[in-house]
Image (cartoon, rainbow, N blue to C red):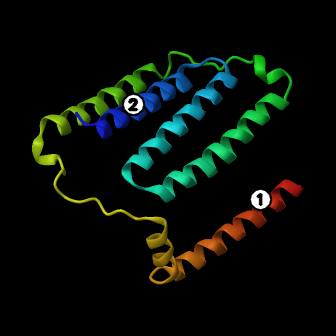
Amino acid sequence: MEIYDIIFYLFAAITLLSAFFVVTSRNIVHAAFYLLFTFFGVTGIYVLLGADFVAIVQLIVYVGGILILLIFGVMITNKITQVDIKTGTVHTLPAAIGVGLFTGIVGAVILNTEWRIVDSPMPVATLSTLGEMLLTEYVLIFELLGILLLVALIGAASMARK
């Protein structure tokens, strides 16, 4: 086992364990902090895969934006920090079925060597190649996405004004 494998399994364990605690935590503040560790674990996996742009976007958007807003929103409101999240046993059976299916699929992939793609090189999209592709081949899609985000921003501002 190489050091790369050890680091990958470390990030995977951090991600899975903290995601488990997000789901099972009864305090919303603790769940938000466990979500922080989940996002950091996913970012570490992206870095290991060589997807530097996706890793930076994960840090900026999720950790820097959404999670901090969630934590501040919870902390600013006075009485919500003492509210317990209601997690009943209603969703236990669907969750068990989902975990069983996921375990079966992962087991089938591990046991069946024909499904593994080990020898094929993974295309590495660095930031410079991604920027070059966005401004040459995919410039129309890039501009349309910018217009879509502008329309969404205007719509959110008009809804917040009311």
- Image quadrant containing the C terminus: bottom right
| Residue at the farthest front position | 3
> In the picture provided, is 98 more to the left or to the right than 21?
left
Q: Residues within 10 Å of mark 1 (few under 14, many from 20)?
A: few
Towards the viewer: 157 or 35: 35
Q: Which mark is residue 30?
A: none
Write down the quadrant of residue 151 in the picture: bottom right
Mark positioned earlier in the residue sequence (1 or 2): 2
The image shows residue 65 at horizontal and vertical percentages of: 69, 47
| Residue at the farthest right position | 162
| Nearest to viewer (mark 1 / mark 2) | 2
Please report the residue visible at 48 percent of the width from the left and 23 percent of the height from the top: 91
The image shows residue 160 at horizontal and vertical percentages of: 84, 54
Please report the residue visible at 44 percent of the width from the left and 49 percent of the height from the top: 47
- Image quadrant containing the N terminus: top left
Write down the quadrant of residue 2 in the picture: top left
Residue 1 higher or lower than 147, as above or below: above
Towards the viewer: 114 or 101: 114
SS at badge 2: helix
Q: Which residue is mark 1?
A: 156
Q: Give, as a three-letter code, the residue at label 2.
A: Leu
Q: Which mark is residue 10?
A: 2
The image shows residue 127 at horizontal and vertical percentages of: 49, 66
Q: Give, as a three-letter code, the residue at label 1.
A: Ala
